[in-house]
Image: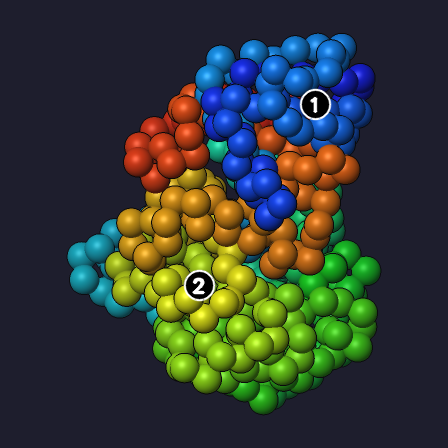
Amino acid sequence: MGGSAGGSVLFDRIGLLYTADPEREELTDAALVTEGDRVAWVGRSADAPAADRRVDADGRAVLPGFVDSHAHLVFAGDRAAEFAARMAGEPYRAGGIRVTVAATRAADDAVLAGRAARLVAEMTRQGTTTVEIKSGYGLTVEDERRSLRIARTLTEETTFLGAHVVPPEADPAEYVDLVTGPMLAACAPYARWVDVFCERGAFDGDQARAVLTAGLRAGLGARVHAGQLGEGPGVRLACELGAASADHCTHLSDADVTALADSGVVATLLPGAEFSTRSPYPDARRLLDAGVTVALATDCNPGSSYTTSMPFCVALAVRETGMTPLEAVRAATRGGAAALRRDDVGTLRPGARADLVLLDAPSYVHLAYRPGTPLVAQVWRGGARVA
Ligand SMILES: [Zn+2]
């Protein structure tokens, strides 16, 4: 998602500008000026200053570029047959990850890099301007390191997920020692975050704690896959260790919800996973009413959520998790930024990075109201048009 910015650009006659800035979250008859790679001015269209270039929004809506804070993009292989079998009645199991691990290990660097870049390009066309990318389909020291090296060429938000699943050839206890020792040492230079799949069939609470603690000691921030398939210790572990985000949060106890609200750990909902596994959706209303910060992300991965589309996830969140359209768009922008501890993206206020989406619609509500419709007309990142 490159592109270079030069000079200033005026976006005017914006029907509805959603800034995601709590100070003034929505403006009508609005304009926005970018200068270089930053937002320079936001206000009423009639008051807008001149700029080097002009984009006439003609009554359409503008919002921040989406922040997709949870994606697994470095992999090879195809699991369409597994999806079809699930739709024919077979349940989802975490062990399916091993199929992708075998294909990923067998692929060369150029194949992995090309596939990941194509997925990022898909995301860009659908309005995503910041993406987090995890490793987790290599599960050897060298395959995890090369996954992160490839991810690093596509985003600064890279996450070491050596603790995705225990590979078939490994003993669980020995594998945790590998992840927290040599694998972490090899991967930390390419990673900003450490993550663990804390779930039955993957890693238990003690193993997850060991992985996260080692990552934190190596200078990484923590994030956790928790509560996807059932309640477990992952959410409270995330809160106790000061993780940025607990992701999935589909199955939560009351104590989990209280811990999220008290700790400020973001609950990142991934409704594409429930869609693709035909599972009950998370209850966003319960989290929002408790005061939890909620993010939305795609969880793009070949097994349980093979979508790159944040607009699709916004539509699912509104239809299936109890969010209003405003809450869902907020979660997909400012919420995702909070999940990555970023304050320079996810909002359109002066000083923020000039990442924005122009919709072929008068309002962001259309993202949920017209699901599956290609409404993203223009995408700008760092002040340059990228789609
Ligand atoms: Zn995931």
- Residue 224, visible in the rendered structure: yes
Q: Which residue is mark 1?
A: 33
Give, as a three-letter code, the residue at label 1: Val
Which residue does the image show at 57% across and 52% down from the upper left?
A: 336
Which residue does the image show at 64% across and 71% down from the upper left?
A: 243
Question: Are there few (<14), some (14-19), or many (20+) residues within 10 Å of tag 1?
Answer: many
Question: Are there few (<14), some (14-19), or many (20+) residues within 10 Å of tag 2?
Answer: some
Number of labels in the image equals 2
Q: Which residue is mark 2?
A: 288
Gap between marks 2 and 1, in whole Å?
Answer: 32 Å
Which residue does the image show at 32% across and 62% down from the upper left?
A: 281
Vertical placement of 387 versus 209: above or below?
A: above
In the rendered image, residue 136, in percent from the top left (x then y), is placed at 58, 62
In the depicted view, which residue is nearer to us: 173 or 229? 229
Of the image marks 2 and 1, the number of the one nearer the N terminus: 1
Quarter the C terminus occupies: top right
Vertical placement of 110 versus 239: above or below?
A: above
Q: Disc 2, disc 1: CB below 8 Å?
A: no
Query: Given the current orientation, which residue lies at the most extreme left position?
Result: 88
In the rendered image, residue 199, in percent from the top left (x then y), is placed at 46, 77
In the rendered image, residue 130, in percent from the top left (x then y), is placed at 63, 43
In the rendered image, residue 117, in percent from the top left (x then y), is placed at 60, 37
